[in-house]
Amino acid sequence: MPKLKKTKNELKAQREALQRYERFLPTLELKKQQLQREVRRAEAGLRRCVRRRDELVAGLRPWAGLLTTSPDLAGHVRVEQVEREIVNIAGVNVPVLLGVRLAAPDIDYFATPAWLDDAVTVLGELVRLEAETAVLERQRELLGEELRLTSQRVNLFEKVMIPQTLDNIRMIRIALGDAQTAAVGRAKLAKSKTVTVLSGKSSA
C-alpha cells in the first residue's frame, strides 16, 4: 500500500473517494436486498415443487402394483420441448421456465386399462415438475453466487474502504493542522527575531 500523502490535494482526493463510496454503498445494499428476495423466491418455488411431487408420488402408491403391469408406461410420456428463456433478475441473467410440451400419448383405450390415462396425466405433471425444479435450482445457484459477491462488496465498503478513508482524512487533517501550527510558530519566531534585530540596530 502506498504511503499516505499528508497534503491538501490528497485530502481533497480522499474526501471525493469517501463521497463515491457513500454514494455507491446504498446501491449495493439495495441490490443485496433484491438478491436475497429472489433467492428466497427460488427456494420457496423449490419447496413447492417438492411438496407437489411428494403428493403426486403418494397418490401413485395405491397403483404401484398396477404400474408394474404396464412396462411401456414411460413411453406414453414423452417430452417434445422444454421452453426456457433468459431474463435479467436483480442484474443476473437466469433461466425461466416457460413451459413443457409433452407429446400426445398414443393410448389404445380399448386395449389398455382404464387407470392408464390417469397415470399418464400424473407422470406428465411429474415431468413438468422435474423441469421446473431444474430451472429453479439453477436460478438459486446463479442468484446465490451473485448474492455472495455483492455481500462481500458491501462488507468491503462498510468495514474496510469507508473506515479507512475516514481514518486517512483524520490523519491528513491532523498532519495539516500540525504543519499549520508549526508554520505559525516559525512565523512568530522569525518576527520576534526580526523585531529583536531591528531593536538592537535602532538602539545602537
Image (tube, rainbow, N blue to C red):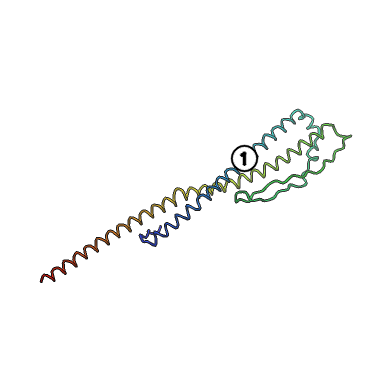
Instruction: Please state which of residues 143 and 169 is positioned toward the viewer in this rendering.
Output: 169
Residue drawn at x 46%, y 48% is: 158
Image quadrant for the N terminus? Answer: bottom left
> Crowding at label 1, few (<14), some or many (≥20) Cα neighbours within 10 Å?
some
Choose between 171 and 123: the one closer to the eye: 171
Rendered image quadrant of residue 126: top right
- Most distant residue in the left direction: 204
| Left or right: residue 6 compared with residue 123 | left
SS state under label 1: helix
Q: Residue at x 35, y 56 (%)?
A: 173
Residue projecting furthest to the top: 62
Looking at the image, residue 10 sits to the left or right of residue 203; the answer is: right
Tell me residue 60's x, y (percent). Answer: 75, 31
Taking the image as shown, residue 90 lies to the left or right of residue 194, namely: right
Q: Is residue 91 above or below residue 199?
A: above
Instruction: Classify residue 175 as left or right of residue 47.
Output: left
Q: Viewer-proximal residue, 41 or 196?
A: 196
Image location (x, y in percent) of residue 87: 66, 50
Seen from this angle, which residue lies furthest right?
110
Rendering coords of residue 8 (x, y %)? 37, 61
Give coordinates of residue 192: x percent, y percent: 19, 64
Vertical relation: 107 (above or below) 192: above
Quarter of the rendering containing residue 77:
top right
Which residue position is annotated with label 1? 43
Front-most of residues 182 and 153: 182
The quadrant the C terminus occupies is bottom left
The correct choice, above or below, for 40 with respect to 204 in the image is: above
For the point 78% across and 39% down, the residue is: 74
Q: Amino acid at mark 1?
A: Glu
Task: Tally the marks.
Answer: 1
Q: Residue at x 14, y 68 (%)?
A: 199
